[in-house]
Image (spheres, coloured by chain):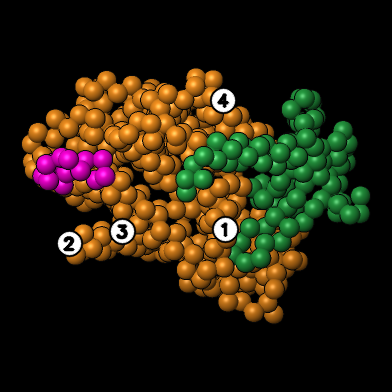
Amino acid sequence: MERLNTQQWHIYWIACFTVFIALSVRLFPLLPLYTNIDLRTQVQSAVQSTAEREGWLISGVSIQHVSNDSVEVLYRSYFRGADSIECYAISLQSRSLSACDAS
Amino acid sequence: MRRFLVIISLQAYAVLLALYQGLASVRTDEAKYLLDIPYPHPPLMRVLMHVTEQFPLQEFFWRITLATLMVQSVWIVVSLVKKWAPEKRLTLCGLWLFSSAILFQAGSIMMAPITALQGLLFVWILLRKGDQKAYQGKAGWVALLWLGSLFTAYQSVLYGPIVLAIFIRRRVHFLHTIVAIGVPIVLVAMYIAVNPLAAASLINAGGQNIHMPFLDTAQLVLGSWLWSGSVVLSLLGLVGMIRAKQWALLGSTALVFGFLFTSYRPYYAVLFLPLLVGGVLVTPSVLKRSATLLALQIVVMVWIFAHTQLSFYPSPARTVMQQLNQLPHDGVVLVSGTFGHQWQYESSSPLYRYSAVLLSKAKAVVCLDSCPGVRLYGFYPIENTATEVWVRQQ
């Protein structure tokens, strides 16, 4: 315990750095959402209309990657049991949906 | 032996509180945490809860765990008043145990009671007396607790003034203090940025009281503060921290009041609790007539309990889903209308919003609102359910 006490700040900074790296990796593909207001509006509208059409609950949608013409999302059905997770690309122009591996 | 009996009695109280909370089935926010649905809070506790999803009694496991933590944390309070007269010590414990926030929130699976517990830990660290040098060497653990509490729930930031006071009291270098407190806040901001849904949810929560008249909001917030400590602890705690000029506690209390003004929810009342206990701890003289105060606290708590509407029946989500989970065929469940996450928690099949085009995938349809077209797709209604339910014909 004494040895841990001497390392406490190191443990704290390692924890902070690990969280920072994990979040940075996720944040980088989403940066266009925060730098381009028009794109953000388009993405919001595309995700909402797709969720409405597909019967998705918006709480199950997680945005993975954003580009100028499409947004990649994971849809997870939460329930008691093994949740199903599916990856889709939504076209920002046509609002059409395609499986990630097909696009 | 006496201490052991006290622990057992407290545990019995905790189990009763957990069972009481379980009477009304899982609520929407509780379901959100138990299923690890990623908004609005950061993931630390949610992930722990999700790990236990396969437990058949997951809900009760967490109710009992959280109720136990809330009730048994009275020992943390006791550890700060070892030198007090037994009567005063007992009164302080009674004020904690018989506060409405403990009675009504201890067994709920919410982030607010967990945040309040983390707040109590910060208050404990702030008010502990002892070798200053030994404490000075443990500031890194406090920083780690701060990081952990912020990644449990955003509301931990309301205890920021206490954390700041801890660092100042331990004579941690100013720049080190600012960085140690600021970096976790920046990380939480990054977490919000990678979860646009959490960001939207926060913006929504922050503006929910905007259209409410100021006096109505003030009434709710003040009521929340009084309710939290069953009036007696609420008043004593606030008077205590003002008389002792305990700026860290006052700062946090002001932040909790401010937060409730913008984002009022009844369950945030528990956030006052550790601060109120801290207020009594810094001014023991407020407990002058301790026996009378404790008696009054119990009377108020009983009065509040007697005027609270109790729910003894399982929710429609539970009764309906128990029937649908027994259906032999596969498929999703469609739900029309507005519904909470408790419907997902009770279901053993994926849930989708009702749309006639999804009927081909469905094994059942729950109509909380109208379900146009369901009759045409080979579904038949089932009787004696809490709401309109249609099941696919085999």
Mark 1 on the same chain as mark 3? yes
Can you give x and y, in whole percent of width and height, for residue B301 in the image? 21, 47
Q: Which residue is mark 4?
A: B179
Quarter holding the C terminus of chain B is: bottom right
- Report crowding for label 3: few under 14, some 14 to 19, many 20 or more residues within 10 A (C-alpha): many
Q: Which tag is nearer the camera, tag 2 or tag 3?
A: 2
Q: Earlier in the sequence, mark 1 or mark 2?
A: 2
Q: Earlier in the sequence, mark 4 or mark 2?
A: 2
Residue at 59% over, 38% down: A10
Q: Chain of mark 2?
A: B
Q: Chain of mark 4?
A: B
Residue A99 in which image quadrant: bottom right
**Image-based side of B315 in relation to B296, left or right:** right
Can you give x and y, in whole percent of width and height, for residue A89 in the image? 84, 47
Q: Earlier in the sequence, mark 2 or mark 3?
A: 2
The orange-coloured chain is labelled B
Looking at the rendered structure, the kind of residue marked 2 is Arg
Q: Considering the numbered disc 3 on the image, is that residue within a helix, a strand or a loop? A: helix
Of the numbered discs in the image, which one, if any, rests on residue B383?
A: none
Q: Which tag is nearer the camera, tag 1 or tag 2?
A: 2
Q: Earlier in the sequence, mark 1 or mark 3?
A: 3
Q: Considering the numbered disc 2 on the image, is that residue within a helix, a strand or a loop? A: helix
Q: Are marks 2 and 3 in contact (CB under 8 Å)?
A: no
- The answer to whether residue B158 of the structure is visible from this angle is no
Q: Which residue is mark 1?
A: B50
